[in-house]
Image (cartoon, rainbow, N blue to C red):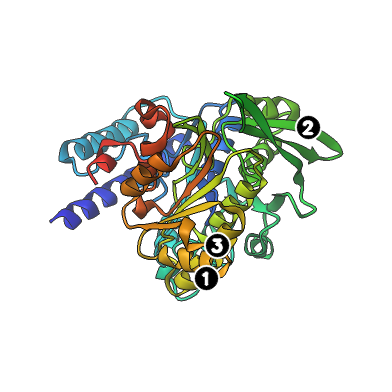
Amino acid sequence: MKNVFKQIVTTIIWWQSQIILRKYHPKIVAITGSVGKTSTKDAIYAVLGSAYSARKSDKSFNSQLGVPLTILGRPNGWNSFWLWFKNILWGFKLIFTRSKYPEWLILEIGVDRPRGLSKLTKWLRPDIVVITRFGKVPAHVEFFDSREGVVAEKGSLVKALKPGGLLILNGDDEDAMSYRDRSKEKTLTYGVESLSTLRGGNYYITYKEINGFSFPEGFNFKADYDGSSVPVSISGVIGDHHMYPILAGLLVGISQNLPLLSITDVFKNHLPPPGRMSLVPGEKNTMIIDDSYNASPVALEEALKSFEDVKGKGRKITMLGDMLEIGRYSADEHKKLGEKAAAISDILITVGIRAKYIAEGALSGGMSEKVIYQYEDSREAGKFLENLLKPGDLILVKGSQGVRMEKAVEEIMAEPEKKKILLVRQDEEWARR
């Protein structure tokens, strides 16, 4: 019965969304890829929202329900019949009355099953398509015949681009760049390693002194475009991979003739979404690098690389949970990244049944079993770590959504009363899970 109700609701709001788009004619930016979609969406929204009325997908609203709900400007109804009824009524209001509507929609679009995206793009026609990154083992590859199947499915969005539209690609990702030859529309690129239209470089972490210890507070880099070099400062997160969402946002702004110098100022007070290498003060004068939103091999590798770059007097503690939905790649990828974790960590804590392979990889990498601890539950792991902490410690926390690593962060953060602001998955629906 529940599935029937969901199908009815989906059909209605899809139909409403198509009518609303035809009536109000907003410009649409659609973002897809396997890594960095939400951060890229937020960065683009920050830029376009500084000059236009804009609406973005809420949090990680990127599903076949999330996209039309963003078009309607309504929340997820979860299991509430009444809230879904209100959402549908609101859709009819937009259709039958003249309402104020955003000039731009910034839509994050994900797919975890074959043909999921191609169904959506039968009626969604973006003005700008942004492709982020894939990596050698993309997220959700478990449900496809191959990694090429994931790349091909997300290519449906490129085919949906409006005539005269703009394709923006991550120039450092081979799979993203493969779309260049599949589109006749104008293409711009952003990157760090490649000769892209907009290029980032000179990344370095900034620090602040807290009670005698130096902790990271953000990072700076330079954005180079058309002979000009502009400094960009970001607070509250670290990781050179965070340059990519910012560069994508700047490039969208440049495409709309917004001055580069003015739109870089947007990021002085911009906070990327929680759980993406966010800096969260920890108990006992420690610092947590909270990357608990999700995990895939490429994202975990980036997180470990960024953690290695951080300088400090204290120990480096790595807490890693299962990487889900990578199918036959699971054991090998967990082991490989366990070896990398061993090379940079003083203590390793794993969470989940798949993460045992991270521990195996760390042992193979020469880490002593005396500093490797394994748990099945993230909250229990957090409680254990709470007793282990010493002033000056740096803690990296990462794992797939299903492992709920934010619960571990909650146990060790200095101000748990701020968890709804600082952590991911703090809605009531998530709290009940």
**Label 2 to label 1, Cα distance in Å?**
37 Å
What residue did someone put label 1 on?
A: 147
**322 or 126, nearer to the observer:** 322
Residue 391 visible? The answer is yes
Is the residue 319 above or below the residue 116 in the image? above
CA separation, marks 3 and 1? Answer: 32 Å
Query: Can you give x and y, in whole percent of width and height, for residue 30 in the image?
Result: 53, 47
10 Å crowding of disc 2: few (<14), some (14-19), many (20+): few
Of marks 3 and 1, the one in the foreground: 3
User: In the structure shown, which secondary structural element does the residue marked by tag 1 occupy?
Assistant: helix
Residue 300 picture quarter: bottom right
Pick the front one: 378 or 209: 209
Q: In 3D space, how far apart are the residues under numbered discs 2 and 3 (Cα atoms)? A: 42 Å
Residue type of the residue flagged with mark 3? Met
Badge number at residue 367: 3
Q: Which residue is denoted by mark 2 in the rendering?
A: 230
